[in-house]
Amino acid sequence: MSIYYTAQRKTRIFDPSAEEPFLISRSGIELFMECPRCFYLDKRKGVARPNGFPFSLNNAVDALLKKEFDIHRAAGSKHPLVKAYGIDAIPYADERLEEWRDSRTRGIKFVHEPTNLAIHGGIDDIWINPQDELHIVDYKATSKSGEVNLDADWQISYKRQVEVYQWLFRKNGFKVSDTAYFVYCNGNADKEAFDGKLEFDVKIIPYVGNDGWIESALGDIKKTLMAGETPDPDPDCDYCKYRFAMKRIEK
């Protein structure tokens, strides 16, 4: 198992002497923002954080929302929910949409020449307004009491996510609105019975992004990759806390 894992990771380990651009996903940038040490161990040493469990229900919601919005994309019409929120936009039709959505084929990509990093990410959706500006759209699914919002500290990752997508599309020559939208689906657990059906309350939350941090972050990422030494952990990183705790008890 360890031999297979090491061989599998070699293709994604940063080589300071390599001339070809090094691939960094949107989630890779988020990993660096969360903890430079975990990022370094992943990209330089090939030791990634343990994989989380797949969010199968969330994936199902994503797939159904894409099908639903694609119907209006094909018709050039406004989705009823978008209309209800007074948003003047329709789903953006482009033959490259499926490519941009597919993170397995790197989604939308851009090579950042100052760092020689190839940034990529798979989007959920794009809408377009009458000013020919694109709105980045991200689907989220949860089940909680009360209204969903973007107020929790941990949701900074959601905000950075759409900001990276805004940056990627701008770097690819598109006119992009600062306003992104989250289509947030909240599973309703207050029904009297399940009856083989889970119902959701769906809300659209606008977010005004600012991608000004990304250029600086990419510079810091490249410096970290080139440094050749493991950075200090983020004090709030539970993964690093676990690693250090295990080292103490194994002595």
Image: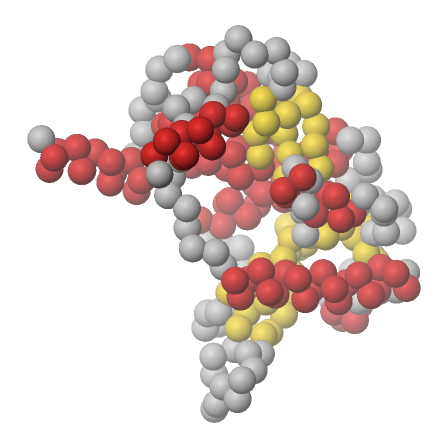
Which quadrant of the rendered structure holds the C terminus? top left
Q: Position of residue 247 (x, y in %)?
A: 17, 32
Q: Can residue 20 be spotted in the picture?
A: yes
- Residue drawn 34% across the image and 34% down it: 2
**Quarter of image, res 219:** top right
**Quarter of image, res 175:** top right
Q: Can residue 213 be spotted in the picture?
A: no
The front one of 22 and 237 is 22
- Residue drawn 43% across the image and 22% down it: 44
Q: Position of residue 26 (x, y in %)?
A: 58, 37
Q: Position of residue 48 (x, y in %)?
A: 40, 35
Give the residue furthest to the bottom: 192
Residue 98 to residue 145: above or below:
above
- Residue drawn 71% across the image and 37% down it: 108
Residue 87 to residue 11: above or below:
below
Residue 160 to residue 55: above or below:
above
The front one of 161 and 28 is 28
Q: Position of residue 34 (x, y in %)?
A: 42, 36
